[in-house]
């Protein structure tokens, strides 16, 4: 199976070294990183290079591209994750990405899929609910951006729920 996923408007592909500058600019924006507990802030060239070097060898960590431009990142293994740079918010890209990733995930397995969002991230919450995810637990996680514990709502989606609405 190809590592790339093509949607109507986007290509999800492995990360490349040339993504680093855009990665620093987009995820380095506190409006983005504040919702991602695992992302350090400030996000540096070293962070980007380290991430891209590691992610290029992973099948499930992908760059989100619009034309030739990096606009965000996503991943799916046993957990769905995604982020977009601020200029790309509110255009339906997150829904397009998440739907494609969930489709691919359930084409390979019937295991439930986990995801979640930082409490207060209403856009991600609405998207996950629209996809059929249900709340499971809330837990506190240390945020590298905020340098403090933040509350995260964990959610899950079953193959049956996805198949019934797909």
Image (cartoon, rainbow, N blue to C red):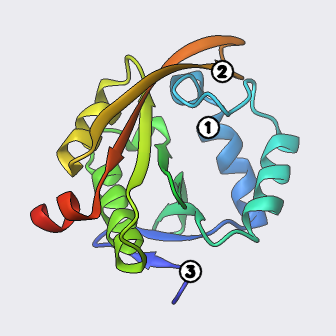
Tell me the element at label 2.
Answer: strand
Q: Which residue is mark 2?
A: 143
Residue 95 image position (x, y, % from top left): 28, 52
Quadrant position of residue 134: top left
Compared with 145, 155 (above or below) is below
Q: Which residue is mark 3?
A: 3
Marks 3 and 2 in Cβ contact (< 8 Å)? no
Q: Residue at x 36, y 39 (%)?
A: 89
Q: Residue furthest left?
A: 165
**Left or right: residue 141 compared with residue 111:** right
Residue 134 marker: none
Q: Residues within 10 Å of mark 2 (few under 14, many from 20)?
A: many
**Left or right: residue 138 compared with residue 102:** right
User: Which mark is nearer the camera, 1 or 3?
Assistant: 3
Q: Residues within 10 Å of mark 1 (few under 14, many from 20)?
A: many
Q: CA distance from mark 3 to mark 2?
A: 30 Å
Q: CA distance from mark 1 to mark 3?
A: 23 Å
**Which of the pair 143/134 is nearer the observer?**
134
Q: CA distance from mark 1 to mark 2?
A: 14 Å
Residue 27 marker: 1
Compared with 87, 41 (above or below) is above
**Which of the pair 27/53 is nearer the observer?**
53
Q: Residue at x 50, y 52 (%)?
A: 79
Q: Earlier in the sequence, mark 3 or mark 2?
A: 3
């Amino acid at each position: 199976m190809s590592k790339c996923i093509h949607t109507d408007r986007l290509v999800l592909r492995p990360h490349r070294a040339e993504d680093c500058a855009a990665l620093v600019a987009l995820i380095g924006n506190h409006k983005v990183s504040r919702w991602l507990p695992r992302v350090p802030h400030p996000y540096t060239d070293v962070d980007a290079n380290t991430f891209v070097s590691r992610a290029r060898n992973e099948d499930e960590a992908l760059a989100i591209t619009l034309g030739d431009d990096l606009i965000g990142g996503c991943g799916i293994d046993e957990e769905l994750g995604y982020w977009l740079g601020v200029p790309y918010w509110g255009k339906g890209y997150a829904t397009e990405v998440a739907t494609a990733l969930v489709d691919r995930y359930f084409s390979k397995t019937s295991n439930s899929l986990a995801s979640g969002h930082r409490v207060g991230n209403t856009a991600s919450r609405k998207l996950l609910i629209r996809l059929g995810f249900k709340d499971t637990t809330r837990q506190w996680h240390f945020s590298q951006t905020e340098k403090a514990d933040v509350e995260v709502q964990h959610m899950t989606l079953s193959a049956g729920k996805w198949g019934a609405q797909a």
